[in-house]
Image: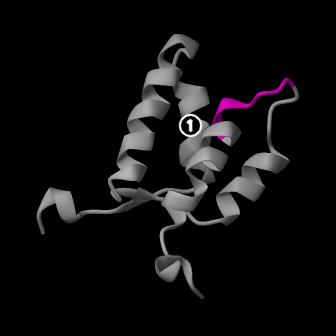
Amino acid sequence: MATSQVVWVIDTSSIIEVRRSTQKRHRERIFRKLTRLVTEGRLAYPPQVVAELERSAQSKPPDPQLVWAKQNASAAHGNGSCFAG
């Protein structure tokens, strides 16, 4: 399978890891690149991710992970077929 056909499906912990493992000054660039992957259809996450991030959001808004997940939710969930039960 060609790399361009691969779709990465990530979970909440993968998004939270951006905060844990990167310096604050790099996060905006990282989220821009993740947005590009979502827009290209190469990165997806299930609808539950936004709810989980809302429950664990940092007390000082805005929580960058939650903001990013909400902004990309529609595209990241696609038509929903890959997340249907």
Report the residue at 57% width, 15% height from top. Answer: 24
Q: Main secondary structure of the magenta part?
A: loop
Q: Which residue is mark 1?
A: 17
What x and y, as percent, mark residue 19? Answer: 60, 28
Vertical placement of 20 versus 46: above or below? above
Residue 19 falls within the magenta-colored stretch: no
Report the residue at 80% width, 43% height from top. Answer: 56
Foreground pick, 77 / 7: 77
Report the residue at 84% width, 49% height from top. Answer: 55
Question: Is the residue marked by circle 1 packed among few (<14), some (14-19), or many (20+) residues within 10 Å?
Answer: few
What x and y, as percent, mark residue 82? Answer: 47, 78
Vertical placement of 42 versus 71: above or below? below
In the displayed image of the protein, which residue is found farthest to the bottom?
85
- Check the picture and name the quadrant holding the N terminus: bottom left
Foreground pick, 56 / 44: 44
Q: Which residues are magenta?
A: 60-65
Residue 7 falls left or right of residue 64: left
- Check the picture and name the quadrant holding the C terminus: bottom right
Residue 37 falls left or right of residue 27: left
